Amino acid sequence: MKKRILVAVIIAVLAGFFASRYPDGLDKVSGMLGFSGLAKENGAVMKDYTISFIGQTPISSAIAGIIGVFIVFGVFEVIYLMLRKKAVVPSEVATSRKTRAK
């Protein structure tokens, strides 16, 4: 698990330095069709994959990527722990199944 997190953090850091400053496909199409100004922001935490007090720099994107990695791994860890607890078979049920099989 630690290796996966480390690899994900390295990828997130490197992606911050190679990310394009040009708008993505959705932004470009919304600009071409004239509805880009209609969107409403609802207080995004990491708007445009940056940290607001650092500004739009590769380091800001890298930090936002690292934060995103830990958020995603945290969510999946919680889901895993919840599902694992439900899937545990009590020892009494397991032993009764063994005795029936004999």
Image (cartoon, rainbow, N blue to C red):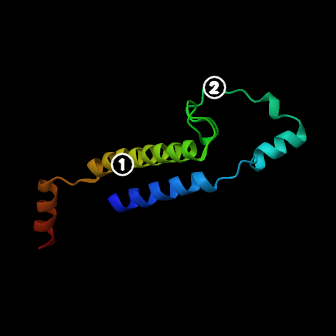
SS category of the residue bearing label 1: helix
Q: Label 2 sits on what residue type?
A: Asn
| Residue 92 position within the rendered picture, expressed as x and y whole percent measured from the top left | 11, 54
Please report contact status of discs 1 and 2: CB closer than 8 Å, yes or no. no
Q: Front-most of 88 and 5?
A: 5
**Label 1 environment density (alpha carbons within 10 Å; few <14, some 14–19, many ≥20):** few
Q: Is residue 86 left or right of residue 51?
A: left
Question: Which residue matches tag 2?
Answer: 42
Give the number of the disc on residue 21. none
Please determine whether, in this image, residue 91 is positioned above or below residue 70.
Answer: below
The residue most toward the right is 33
Q: CA distance from mark 1 to mark 2?
A: 27 Å
> Which numbered mark, 1 or 2, is in the foreground of this view?
2
Residue ID for mark 1: 77
Q: Is residue 31 left or right of residue 98?
A: right
Residue at 77% in and 43% down: 27
Q: Give x and y (percent) for residue 90.
A: 17, 52
Tell me the quarter of the image containing the N terminus.
bottom left
Q: Classify the position of the C terminus by image quarter.
A: bottom left
Residue 1 visible from this viewpoint: no
In terms of depth relative to the viewer, which is nearer, 12 or 94?
12
Classify residue 27 as left or right of residue 102: right
Q: Position of residue 52 (x, y in %)?
A: 58, 31
From this view, report whether residue 10 is shown above or below residue 21.
Answer: below
Q: In this orientation, which residue lies closer to the viewer: 38 or 90?
A: 38
Label 2: which secondary element: loop
The amino acid marked with disc number 1 is: Glu
Residue 80 locus on image (x, y percent): 35, 50
Q: Is residue 86 visible?
A: yes
Residue at image point 41% right, 49% down: 73
The residue sitting at 52% across, 53% down in the picture is 12
